Image (tube, helix red, strand yellow):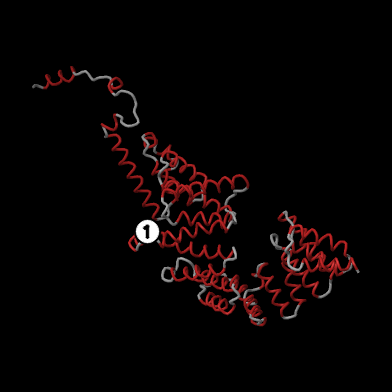
Amino acid sequence: MTTSNWKDTLRAIKVPDQRATTGQADEFLTLDDIVTVKKDSLRRQLHRVLSEIEELAREDRWDDILALACPVEQKFPELCDKGLDLELRAKVSFALGQKSRFDDAIAQLKICVERDPSNFHYHSALAYNAYNSLYAAMNKEIFLRGKLKAERIELAHRHLRMAQELRPQGITNFYREGMLYKKIEGKSDRSIPLFQKAVDNWEGLGPEEKKARHQECKNYVKALYQLASALLDNGLARKALAYIEKCIEADRESNHLSMVYKYFALGKVHFELNEFREAKDALVFALEVNDNKPVDFVYELLARVWLALNNPQKALETILTVPEKKRRPYYRWTEADVYCAMGDFNTARVVLTSTLDRDRRSKHRALIKLAKIEYLLSNFKKAEEYAKQASEFFHERWGGILNDALFWQALCAYRTGDCNRSKKLALELKAHNPRYPKLQTLLTKLRQSESS
């Protein structure tokens, strides 16, 4: 066939109208699924972008990732049009989270879970960003309060549970929901079964499974630690001891958690069990393995241990280890206890009053201690005034009734002969806490004074 002939033949071919031959749109098959050249080119583009993001992520170049791929709709509209954008959105969301742009990260992941609701990774990532945003708010890095905080907590719970349903033998998402309850919501009792599930799931794995999922071992160790802490918070110190000992043993080689924190926790459990010598040994070891980080909390508990061992001089030596300007209010409360144990009430007064101006959260604790000191020294009017100040501060700061303040006001009123006011305060305390220590003794004395 000559050149002119094949050209004539080509011109004679009638190209059909594509719209007339492709039929109706169908979610199962389109022309692009048959003639895949365009889709293949988009997949190659996606692969190149994801590879570049992985390379940047290895160097923590989060800003560069965002410059490359965010917003996804503007940078890669064709990928979005063809539904090839979800993995890219997930990668971008991680970079956004690393830059504390949690709202933007969550927005990307909501698109992912809506379009792929059975994808474990998308639910887990969305929950993780919600969870991290709550920690950032707790640390005052971002603002998240009231209704916004409640909604974020609910979002985190919802997607943590979806991830748990999709992978019921996982560890990390059970651990994270436990932390959500314990640290964010202050509900340590509700965290216990979640930490327990994380622990049981890991311990139920075989050696090969543990090797394959080694990255989750860290959260197993942390779950052991937090489970011990939650059990201790809920009065189960003996069970807590078993889990903190297991945590120390499981983490002996990897040291996922600081030895200072692990042995401090061990000392704290022994202290709650009144095993003071064991507590002392654990706390002393915690100080020995410290790598120059602030450990005032260890010194404070060790001082209380020395007091329990009837050695106030050793307690004083311990408490004075931390420079005065670095002693936080809780530390100074124990410092005051040490001076009281040594009979030096004047110094104890000075220590406690020094905390009043700078303590905006728990000043009532120091005020009640001052009330007790003045009562012990028979300064009942002064003691009652401190108790009244504690009551007013607590009500203004926390919006509730401070049982200790009611009791010490009632007792001081009794000691100064104002039995009517004492009875009124004592009955108010009884209405709130009928089992308050020594309240019944005070009520008995008040009844006796009325009948005499």
Q: Count the marks: how many?
A: 1
Instruction: State the residue position of label 1.
Output: 213
**Residue 31 image offset from top left, x and y in percent:** 29, 29
Q: Left or right: where does residue 61 sit relative to residue 285? A: left
Q: Left or right: where does residue 432 sit relative to residue 112? A: right
Q: Is residue 248 visible?
A: yes
Considering only vertical position in the picture, is 222 above or below 338?
above
Q: Left or right: where does residue 432 sit relative to residue 150? A: right
**Looking at this view, is 426 or 278 the one in front?**
426
SS of the residue under disc 1: loop
Quarter containing the C terminus: bottom right
**Looking at this view, is 347 or 174 the one in front?**
174
Q: Residue at x 42, y 43 (%)?
A: 89
**Residue 136 image offset from top left, x and y in percent:** 55, 53
Considering only vertical position in the picture, is 160 above or below 198?
above
Question: Which residue is the extreme one toward the left?
Answer: 1
Q: Is residue 94 visible?
A: no
**Residue 188 image offset from top left, x and y in percent:** 57, 59
